[in-house]
Image: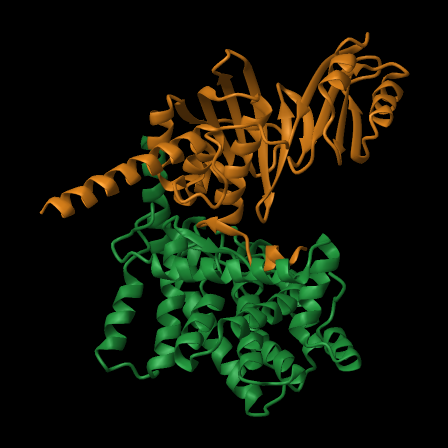
Chain colours: A orange, B green
Amino acid sequence: MNLFDIIGPVMVGPSSSHTAGAVKIGFVSRRLMGCDIRRAEILFYGSFRTTGRGHGTNLAVVAGLLGMHPDDDRIPHSLEYAKRAGMEVEFGNVELKDAHPNSVLLRLTGVDGKKLSIVGESVGGSLINIAEIDGLSANFTGDNPTLIAHNDDEPGHVAAVTSMLAAEHINIATMQLYRKSRGGTAVMVIETDQEITKEGLAWLRHMPGINKITYYSVADLGDTPADRMRREDEAAREQNGEVREAEKRRS
Amino acid sequence: MSYSTLSSICEESESTGIPFWQLIERDDCRERQVSEDEVFETMRGMYHAMKAADRSYDPELRSASGMTGGEGAKIEAYRKSGHALLGDFLSEVIEKAVKMAESNACMHRIVAAPTAGSCGVIPAVLLAYEDFRGAEEDEIIKSLFVAAGIGEVLAETACIAGAQGGCQAEIGSAAAMAAGAVAFLEGGDNETVIHAAALAIKDLLGLTCDPVAGLVEVPCVKRNAAGAAVAMTAAELALAGVRSQIPPDEVVEAMDAVGSQIPACLRETAEGGLAVTPTAKRIQERLNQQSDME
């Protein structure tokens, strides 16, 4: 365990798993989407469902989807921020099979119309696991760049993907392989130490037998609604301050 | 981290002449490949965040469940009335502990130390100490490394999560860390520091985690006050020369063993202890109805 996991992290309470972890699930999901979210259906399972309200899990997930971090003091008011950002939010419950007790299913629609369904789990401390994307197993933490490839279960695809990574001098941190059935669909989940280039991803997408490539980047994806609203608020405060100063001078 | 026992930190400090706190700081430098200055300043940032959280206490705040809020202000008022039996210092310690834990329950920003549920213990002790003794901030930062070293050994050898080892793992760990920090600040040597930690753990060994409705509120908020008071007691005993008859590392091992022997119903599952009292069940029922209505 890291020193600053013992004294730290700085976070909005009350619970590292039900609050901080839930913010992270939202945050990682927004990154996976790659753009702002227009509509989010947030469905709770297990302990998230039974004790989530008291732990602010609902507010936490929404905060993360807006691009807030677990130490953002706006988390308790995230629903108002969602309204302001034009993100539609709906809460509910869901039964999930073989899911971790702290799980949430997110059905997201991006501003570009893209749809994504994600099962996120808060697995202890504020550590999380993205368990499923669009109904298929994923299992990654969101701490590293991650490549998820869905391919036909036949020889050569792992070699193709790993040789592309080798050619780009990308080191593999962890790698998982599984399949639904022999000769059916197989999944590769590869966490890497470096980011994969657009060209590398495009090359994989054109490989016959590889049906879907999902890529999770930890690089700065630019402005989030949370960033924009913070700037707006700061500007408004400054202006108010200036107005008050001016009034003081006048009187 | 490189140390899984308290005695190994003391032995290395002895043989190299490097202080306990600095061994912990340098260990993090190696682990994350950063400079000593950077690690020290990161820790200062944690202390400043604790101070900010203490200042931001709002007596009007209530938690979503309605069970938590306003108690810290009552303790403050009582202390200021001049009736406090504990004396100014200890009375301020328990006040700050409750305030911080309330802020956590009410979704304010806090520093988990080692967990969010036990976030009141260490800042309560250190903030009150800084006021009371007029201590240099750099010394307080060093004491946080001492606390972190004790916490890392506990995390590695025993546990710091209530779901894993009961409340002794959360409030117990926080109290041990705070006790060691205060023993260091008062000029105690390494042996005094680790005995302060051991005495605190022994006082809280076996403490159950039985939160009402599964929320980090009852009994957690007030346990922060108790943990901080235990930390001060343990530090004072150790500084007076009192030693734990059981060596500190054996105490840590006992804590680990007890943690796994505590039944699951008393490890954050809300299926035993205070969580299944008639009143707790009524509260749980009311909260369930609220959730269903939404």
- Residue A83 horizontal side relative to residue B49, left or right: left
In the rendered view, does B16 fall on the left or right side of A87?
A: right
Residue closer to the observer: B92 or B50? B50
> Which quarter of the image is occupied by the N terminus of chain A?
bottom right
Residue A51 in picture, x, y percent from top left: 44, 42
Can see residue B87?
yes
| Residue A60, image x, y percentages | 45, 38
Is residue B218 visible in the rendered structure shown here? Answer: no
Q: Residue furthest front?
A: A249
Snapshot quadrant of residue A150: top right
Residue at 54% across, 67% down: B174
- Going by the picture, which residue comes out furthest to the left? A251
Q: Position of residue B189 (x, y in %)?
A: 64, 85
Give the residue displayed 89% in from the left and 21% down from the top: A159
Residue at image position (66%, 63%) is: B152
Residue A162 image offset from top left, x and y in percent: 85, 25
* A149 is higher (above) or lower (below) than B8: above
In the rendered picture of this protein, how many numbered marks are placed on residues? Answer: 0
What residue is at 23 percent from the left and 82 percent from the top? Answer: B82
Q: Is residue B251 left or right of residue B30?
A: left
Tell which of B151 and B13 is nearer to you. Answer: B13
Viewer-proximal residue among B291 and B85: B85
